[in-house]
Amino acid sequence: MYIKTIDFSKFSSIKVGVPIEVLMIERDDEIPKDRMIIGHANNLLVSSSPEPLMMLSKDFSFMELEDEVLTVGCATPTGKLLSFAKKNNLKGFEFISKLPGSIGGMLAMNAGVKSYEIFNILDAIKIDGVWVEKKDIEHGYRFAKLDGVATEVRFKITKGFSTELLDELVNLRSNQPKTASAGSAFKNPEGDYAGRLIEEVGLKGVSKGAMQWSEVHANFLVNHGGGTFEEAKYLIDLAKKKIFEKFNVMLKEEVKLF
Ligand SMILES: Cc1cc2nc3c(=O)[nH]c(=O)nc-3n(C[C@H](O)[C@H](O)[C@H](O)COP(=O)(O)OP(=O)(O)OC[C@H]3O[C@@H](n4cnc5c(N)ncnc54)[C@H](O)[C@@H]3O)c2cc1C
């Protein structure tokens, strides 16, 4: 293991944060219990004083296909898995196309689009060095209880990558803001949309410093350049408060605040 200083204002997709020392985990290291694991920071808002952080090194970026079983290391970028699935004609991976990040982040978030989620297609996850079957991992909408660090994931594969489905899902995403963000800020409450509620309380387009509730898609918190954690948190708390007051609904963050 070794320490790497990561500037979250450059590394994170929302471009918020400061340089922080992160412990990089290598192949044979014992995984520390006293640090928060991060992936590629596409769903993170990192403050200037987070809990100690760790990240999987490139040792965990790999894909192996053998006897209808695909094993993928959790530091693998999602784009690489998509390209691999396309090249090898593997079914079920099409939805990954617009989900930036690492495979580890996808697993922890049960990331997905519409009804397509990573847990639909996986078989087992290696957590803290032990293979755990999917049926033994509690999971749901944008949530999975991994209780540890995922280092590898196993898929039983079937043939049939669908370029039609890929195109359909890419089109679906064409309305997303291009400005720096961490994707959806809130999970959708049951039977409703967080974006709709943010609009209803008049926050669509509202800014604090360089951070803004996007004018394109209200549930995207965007950074126009130089936005801070505090500005982002202010807008998140404001939305939660206003929506609770008007609709008696307490939104839950999808983005993880560290
Ligand atoms: C423009 C944009 C669009 C997006 N659209 C979508 C979308 O449509 N659907 C969707 O689901 N998401 C979406 N996201 C969010 C993001 O793509 C996913 O959440 C992604 O899976 C995050 O991966 P990451 O590696 O960046 O994880 P990070 O953001 O670094 O971490 C996310 C969480 O995963 C945990 N984690 C990371 N690695 C591991 C590991 N190895 N073991 C255990 N826990 C781990 C972290 O502790 C943290 O809680 C979008 C993001 C952006 C920027």
Image (tube, rainbow, N blue to C red):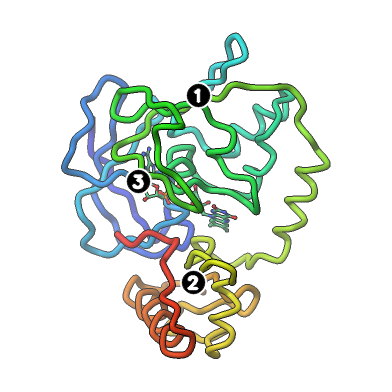
Task: Measure the alpha-carbon separation of dots 3 and 1.
Answer: 20 Å
Q: Is mark 1 within 8 Å of ligand 1?
A: no
Mark on residue 82?
Answer: none
- The image shows residue 186 at horizontal and vertical percentages of 48, 67
Q: Which residue is mark 2?
A: 223
Residue type marked 1: Arg
Q: Quadrant of the C terminus?
A: bottom left
Name the N-terminal-most of marks 2 and 3.
3
Residue lying at the far top in this picture: please name it: 67
Horizontal side, residue 196 vs residue 230: left or right? right
Give SS at disc 2.
strand
**Is label 1 in a helix, a strand or a loop?**
strand
Residue 215 sits above or below residue 5 on the image: below
Q: Is mark 3 within 8 Å of ligand 1?
A: yes
Q: Which residue is mark 1?
A: 154
Q: Residue at x 74, y 58 (%)?
A: 172
Q: Of callouts 1 and 2, which one flags the residue occurring earlier in the amino acid sequence? A: 1
Q: Which residue is mark 3?
A: 38
